[in-house]
Image (spheres, rainbow, N blue to C red):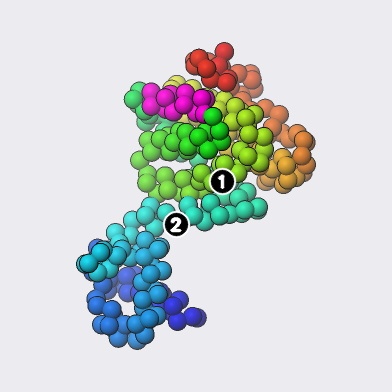
Amino acid sequence: MALTDEAIDRVKRMILAGELAPGQRLPREDVLAEQLGLSRSSLREAVRALTAMRILVARQGDGTYVSGLEPHLLLESLTFAADVSTGEAVRQLLQVRRMLEPPATALAAPLIDDTTLAELRVVLDREAAARDAEEFVAHDMEFHRRIVAVVGNPVLEVLLRSLSGATQRVRVLHGTGDRAVRERAHREHEAIWEALAAGDAALAEATARVHVAGVEHRLAAPTGWVPPNGRARGAGARSRIGERTGPPDGRMGEGRGHPGDPGAK
């Protein structure tokens, strides 16, 4: 084990043993280094690494403290990992998103209030008017963030935000035919909004599942990737996921609708 890794491990063990509690200030560098049997340079590197992990917090002019160790703060580093992921790693992240986001949307359905629905309506209107992929993605992420926030679980919020960050969403849009993909994603968002407005948890889960599966399909289409239980396909090939994006009656974008929405009637 490298010296820095050993230093990180020893500080972590102190935290786990309760020798350093959440919010507690670390001893002076020379004292802690002697206590752990480490060189000051190794300890310094460990402190920098643990600060990047949000385990420690540096306060200007006041030393270094153990953070609050809240899970949602410690998970923030996943966002960077998701943004730099490519190839198979992106698909694996989407698979995990598919496991979490539809049930979270179902949980939000009976809890969401009229104010939040109105805010989501504004987000969707702005999304429909987006001029490019980056602007669309900003509203896309805001739409999903507000829905998950209704559940009131910050750990879930961070996990889902990390699993599919802005960078990944822009990559999917640019890689699969920008405008058409945006219009289809917007129709799927409209369907989710309709289910939430109806307070229908089962429908909310189903529409969210279709949406995330659609993202997987759009990512897979140019590459020939085979999703779990799917069929191999190359560019231009069709799959069970892509053949239908709504309930059996084919009216996913219908219902209340909204003037100017791509799927509105």
Nearest to the observer: residue 40 or residue 219: 40
State left or right for residue 224 relative to residue 114: right
Q: Residue furthest front?
A: 131
Question: Looking at the image, which is closer to me, 178 or 5?
Answer: 178
Residue 256 placement (x, y as % from top left): 49, 15
> Magenta span has 210?
no
Q: Could you say where residue 34 lies in the image, as x and y percent from the top left? A: 30, 86
> What residue does disc 1 label?
168
Q: Name the N-terminal-most of marks 2 and 1.
A: 2
Residue 81 seen by the camera: yes
For the point 73% across and 45% down, the residue is: 223
Pointer 2 local density, CA inside 10 Å: few below 14, some 14–19, many at least 20? some
Chain part drawn in magenta? 118-130
- Pinpoint residue 257: horizontal percent, then vertical percent: 51, 17
- Residue 18 percent location from the top left of the image: 28, 70
Q: Which residue is mark 2?
A: 77
In this orientation, which residue lies closer to the viewer: 41 or 245? 41
Which structural element holds mark 1?
Answer: helix
